[in-house]
Image: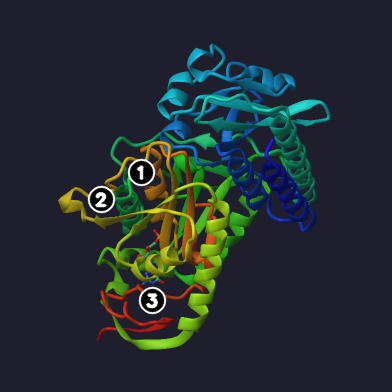
Amino acid sequence: MASGKVRDYYKLIRRVTAELDSGSPIDRFSATVVRGIARSTDGSASLLLLDSTGKKLVHSTSWKLPLSYLKKGALDAKKSIGETVKKQPIAVPSVSRSKRLQYRQYALDAGFTSILGVPILTNGKCIGSIRVYLKENRDFSNNEIEFISTMASLMQLALEHQKSINQEQRLTAIEPEEPKILPMLTKVKFVHPSEEEFASILDFYNIEWVYEPKAFPINWSENGAVTQMFTPDFYMPAYDLYVELTTMKQRSVSAKNKKLRRLRQLYPGTKITLLYKKDFERMLARFGYGPLAQTKGHGVGDVLYSAAQIQRRVHAIAKEISRDYEGKVPVLIGVLRGVLCFMSDLMRNVSVPLNLELMSMSSYGAEEGGVVKITKDVGMNLEGRHVIIVEDIVDTGITLTYLINHICLKNPQSISVCTLLDKKARRLLDVPLDYVGFEVPDQFVIGYGLDFKEEYRNLPFIGVLEQKLEA
Ligand code: 5GP
């Protein structure tokens, strides 16, 4: 095995143990493990956990798995390379010839040729599995299986640690009952107009959603009767994520926050995000709606990064990319127009040969069909290629998620993401980023390609926009 690979394995084990030691949140920890495995095996990876019935395996965190594959649904723990639940690593060297796979056609459609499943064991009992998916016909080496098994052991430690924290934090002795599935109305009746607007934004991006799908009991009387429920506004099945909108008065936001904390304690595996009024209005403004759409730019406020600082950071990222893609010819794909300055500086500093593609996207209102439209798609064949998506800024992560899914369908061998700016505080959809220039505060930034209403792109630095509501 190439010594570079072994070095990758050791590097990842060191990083993962350091995160474990620092008490990194379980979601972040899982993302590091899954992404690290995918990168060091040149494949895709997923962490599957057994649900509360112990019969179904659910994709909890995944990297480079196409949406179409994730959407296949939960796996029957026994049917889907069921031996992993019997505590053995199982390799499926040829997906096309395998009789073991529950969703073989989905795997074939995704272009996977071989799959490895390694169980996560605790006290000899299987609680989940790490899966690795390859698009090349090759056997998994013993070293690879050992490495992934080590990762599975570290994952088990993190899950156990999380469980003990949850037990300590559990305020009530009453076990939460399974959330009730509320009957869905054929035509959704939204309680608040903002919910309807949010639903149409998700529709823009082709993101599947369900309105108020579950009521979570969060408080009980002494005799065990449910006294309080929490029903999140939206659920996005593809991301296993609930979203609660808080577009009302500040007073009710605090009460909502309290309920949310309670829900997280009682249902620790549940991913739920609060979307605050300000964030929601910014989202609407992007489509020309809401109060913020009426704001006017009043020049540049603070300068966050000078031209020289940007250049230094871009050089450093280009060096990292050149090292990671040695011997390969990656395709850099950027979305116009915000990425222009970053892309041109970045590519001129990458030393490996590369190809360049520029895409453009626009979104249309409900009258015009209500979807994101790719007005210029990638022209070249991406089958088997190493793609690097280059972004100006990642904010909610919705655009990038849409883009990754779109590019995944073109069957590249790998996809990684490079963004100049990461506005982490506003993330709604969890998208792993491989190369990040700067983490920016939760403010609207302009310059170095980034605009406000098509202005300010030509500033050589990045600054904060001063905004005022139009009278
Ligand atoms: P997301 O889909 O991640 O919420 O948003 C990504 C896109 O929103 C970016 O490509 C960019 O066009 C726009 N965007 C998000 N935040 C900012 C910002 O602070 N400044 C500017 N100029 N554009 C932003």
Q: Label 2 neighbourhood size at 10 Å, few (<14), some (14-19), many (20+)? A: some
> x%, y% of residue 249?
45, 70
Q: Label 1 neighbourhood size at 10 Å, few (<14), some (14-19), many (20+)? A: some
Residue occupied by mark 1: 406
Helix, strand or loop for disc 1: helix
Q: Gap between marks 3 and 2, in whole Å?
A: 23 Å
Residue 47 visible in the shown view: yes
Left or right: 88 as drawn, with respect to 383? right
Point 49% across, 37% down: residue: 65
Instruction: Please identify the quadrant where the N terminus is shown.
Output: top right
Q: Label 3 neighbourhood size at 10 Å, few (<14), some (14-19), many (20+)? A: many
Q: Mark 1 near mark 3, Cβ–Cβ under 8 Å?
A: no
Q: Mark 1 near mark 2, Cβ–Cβ under 8 Å?
A: yes
Q: Gap between marks 1 and 2, in whole Å?
A: 10 Å
Residue occupied by mark 2: 374
Extreme residue in the right direction: 123
Residue occupied by mark 3: 448
Disc 2 marks a residue whose amino acid type is Ile
Q: Earlier in the sequence, mark 1 or mark 3?
A: 1
Instruction: Please identify the quadrant where the C terminus is shown.
Output: bottom left
Helix, strand or loop for disc 3: loop
Q: Earlier in the sequence, mark 1 or mark 2?
A: 2
Q: Which circle, 1 or 3, is nearer the viewer?
A: 3
Extreme residue in the left direction: 367
